[in-house]
Image: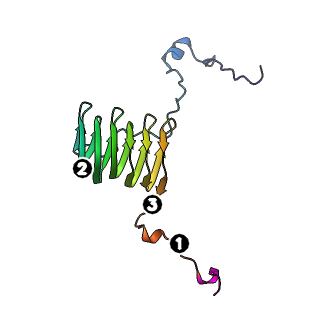
């Protein structure tokens, strides 16, 4: 039909000898790759990283000065001010989380606050409020809660809206 694209085989010009045609490299169409590559490890290589394995069940308050990968279960509070928290595909976290960056591949129940970015990947499941400068939710991920996008240097007091005198009634 007229709308179907037909491909034609590449035929060498008649001027070339059969031996030259065999030596020429075959033409290959470039394959398109994904537009945005996914970073599995959002931190620099060589940075210390702590792992809570699949069989670990912990609760309480967790504070660290290095990146953290949770593949097990954790309940409580997590504070990683200058580091990244990754909840692996087998990870289950019920906590209030504060970190520089959070990547969710597993399950998180609780509020998450970051300075930079929160990523919820395809296998991720988040129930709670998010507060970050940037939020990315991949297609297929589950999210229930609210999102608050913060700007650098913004505080709770600076977010209140002031009404100019010209708009106030009775002035």
The kind of secondary structure element at disc 3 is loop
Residue 118: x percent and y percent?
41, 48
C-alpha span from label 1 to label 3: 15 Å
Q: What crowding class fits label 3: few (fewer than 14 Cα within 10 Å), some (14-19), or many (20 or more)?
A: some
In the picture, which quadrant includes the C terminus?
A: bottom right
Residue behind mark 3:
150
The kind of secondary structure element at disc 2 is strand
Front in this rendered view, residue 1 or 140: 140
Residue behind mark 2:
61
Residue 69 lies in quadrant: top left
- Which mark lies nearer to you, 1 or 2? 2
Locate residue 110 relative to residue 6 in the image: left or right: left
Look at the image and say whether residue 134 sits in the magenta stretch: no
- Which mark lies nearer to you, 1 or 3? 1
Residue 78: x percent and y percent?
29, 49
Whether residues under marks 1 and 3 lie with C-beta atoms below 8 angstroms apart, the answer is no
């Amino acid at each position: 039909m007229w709308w179907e694209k037909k491909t034609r085989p590449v035929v060498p010009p008649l001027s070339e000898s059969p031996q030259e045609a065999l030596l020429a490299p075959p033409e290959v169409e470039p394959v398109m790759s994904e537009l945005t590559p996914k970073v599995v490890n959002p931190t620099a290589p060589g940075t210390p990283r702590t792992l809570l394995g699949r069989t670990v069940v912990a609760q309480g308050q967790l504070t660290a000065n290095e990146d953290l990968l949770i593949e097990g279960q954790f309940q409580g509070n997590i504070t990683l001010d200058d580091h990244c928290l990754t909840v692996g595909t087998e990870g289950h976290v019920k906590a209030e989380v504060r970190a520089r960056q959070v990547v969710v591949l597993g399950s998180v129940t609780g509020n998450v606050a970051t300075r930079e970015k929160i990523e919820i990947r395809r296998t991720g499941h988040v129930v709670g409020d998010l507060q970050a400068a940037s939020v990315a939710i991949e297609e297929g991920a589950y999210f229930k809660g609210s999102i608050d996008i913060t700007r650098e240097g913004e505080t709770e007091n600076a977010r209140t809206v002031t009404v100019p005198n010209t708009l106030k009634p009775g002035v």
